[in-house]
Amino acid sequence: MLQFYSWVLCNCECNCNVLQLKNKSLFSSYNGSSLHPMLKKRDDFEDILEERRRSSDLRYALRCYTPTLYRGLVPCKASMLKSIVLQSDHLQYVIKQVSSESGESTEGVSEEASLILDEMAHCLQLSTIRFFAFTLSKAFKRLFRSVCVNEEGIQRLQQAVQEHPVVLLPSHRSYMDFLMMSYLLYTYDLPLPVIAAGMDFMSMKFVGEMLRMSGAFFIRRSFGGDKLYWAVFSEYVKTMLRNGYAPIEFFLEGTRSRTCKSLTPKTGLLNIVMEPFFKGELFDVNLVPVSISYERILEESLYARELLGIPKPKESTSGLLKARRVLSEDYGSMYVYFGHPVSVRSLAEGKINRSQYNLLPRYIPQKPSADTHEFLSDAAFRLVRIQEENMVLKPWVLIATLLLQNPDGLDLSSLAEQTDWLRHLALAFGAFLDWPDHEACSEVVSCSLALHRHLLSVSAGHVQLSVTDVPQVETTPEEAVFHQAVVVLSCASYRNQILHVFLRPALLAMAMQSANSNRKDDVYNGFNFLRKVFSNEFILCPGDSVQDFEEACYLLMKRGVLQVLEHEIVMSASGHSTLAFLSGRGVAVFSDHKRLILLRFEMSIFCFLCAFVIMASGRLKCYEALSSDLQKNALAAFLRLKAVRKVKV
């Protein structure tokens, strides 16, 4: 390990990959991906709650707020924005088209478009923002020990909003994400974003209107072939973007990730915000990926129950009030990392022929070409991967990984020793890890166990997940399995946060284990097959198979695990433990796939009931097999690989 770091220091000089949180901890990592091929210095972090704890929240909420705007433009009022949208050539064209197709008068269709816009549009008011600033300050100080933000990322964003329209793309792991984003931009005197929100929130009495007045605009979850709704929605977003009215914020993944793994990105909204550039209406658009990390997730138990088939509770004001009991819990630290702005112009250079958009007047809607679809997909995957790589990981994700692979538990001393080994492996693979400086590993582990004690059973120095605990009331075997599965899936949501770090080396380790030879071609073919199998499970950029393979080889080679020759890949004598971890029980999700790859398809419809029966009988202890997300991805993989076919019965 020391030799590895010596190599880094000798070869990279000032580009050392070190990130420091002031007076708190030291982060270090290597990033060997195609996105960031060179080692780079990480940004300093600032705890914004430190100032809030020392000063008045009311004074903070009422302070002078004068954000720097795009090209110094004065934002137009919400009513003016609606007028611009309704009078736009694009919407008027679609209104006439819909009128002609439906036989309804243009006045009637125009009225319908106006009603859609009224339902959708935000109504940003500074007074509401100040109310949220005061309220959220109180809540965040109760919930979190610290909220850390990278200062250089904020400085880059301050520069970006003055040069070109900005689109904010945060990761999505909690309801807290969009609230925190607006809170941070207000704190740093940046323009407040307008946020794409689901219609579920609009049904919440009082709260829905408060969100609308804080910048949320509401869209239906799906509107399929509704040509008029799509036209109103797309024109509304593009008008805000073209006028530089405010940064636009939406989640590339479309919804919260219940597993805490990144979801396959959606490209609909991404196409809308890029289209003004494609059509030459804007010189450029800045896309800013934002990574939001939680030491403890507010909805962890809720997510586990949803994965086990319990319907998501409907958003309601009464539900929000009942949830206030979370304020008495400790959720540790939260990190928000603003990535480097990504220029759409630079992304599209050499990939998009913009002349195709000049063949028709700009106001006439055009379906994206096959090349555009491919470009959007590639850009979306790369942006989500940037989000992953900038996620700050806490020691608990390492501990959770070890506890899941050791269901019978570990002694504290052994847990600390294995956590330290896994920490060094993760850092060598490029993990963005927050590990407290100058603290013994045993102390770090003990602090993490204390924060997540609701998932654990600690007795006589032995630690294991609380899968043996059941409620005091009498329960059936199936109910006991359910309660145990909630704990395992809750813990797995933390393990999943670090899987992207081990993903490519693990695929290579599994390919080497299954190959009958050391030939590089054979190992690559196995790697490529596994990559296809797991493409629904993880973020694997389309067309990057060779790059991913080379990255995996590089990381394992620099770790001293294997030697990459011209035509062969040979495991070194010291690489057995690392390869065993990666291809065996180490990364639990891989072992689950390996053991259940044939079983999971059979669980497609009645699998949930069957798995409950098997587990209740004690014959199977793989609780993650009950996850609806895992089952869905397995079935999708089989369909994609043409191992099965879908038949309507």
Image (cartoon, rainbow, N blue to C red):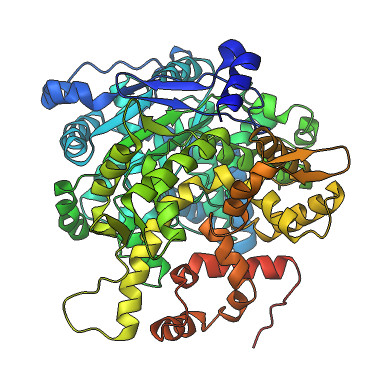
Residue 69 in view of the camera: yes
Q: How many marks?
A: 0
- For the residue pair 19 and 215, the one nearer the viewer reads as 19
x 20%, y 21%: residue: 51
Residue 540: where, in percent of width, then height? Answer: 65, 47
Apparent side of residue 152 relative to residue 464 in the rendered image (left or right): right
Residue 87 seen in the current view: no
Viewport quadrant of the C terminus:
bottom right
| Left or right: 576 as drawn, with respect to 183 | right
Q: Against 125, is 381 above or below? A: below
Nearest the eye: 96 or 10: 10
Would you say 106 lies left or right of 472 here?
right
* Quadrant housing residue 604: bottom right
Note whether 72 is above or below 565 in the view shown. Answer: above
| Residue 527 drawn at (x, y percent) | 74, 53
Picture quarter containing residue 363?
Answer: top right
Work out whether 6 lies above or below 106: above
Quadrant occupied by the N terminus: top right
Image coordinates of residue 95 in percent, x first then y, are 57, 50
Q: Residue furthest right?
A: 567
Residue 494, given in percent of the width and then of the height, sits at 41, 51
- Relative height, residue 417 to residue 325 (above, below): above
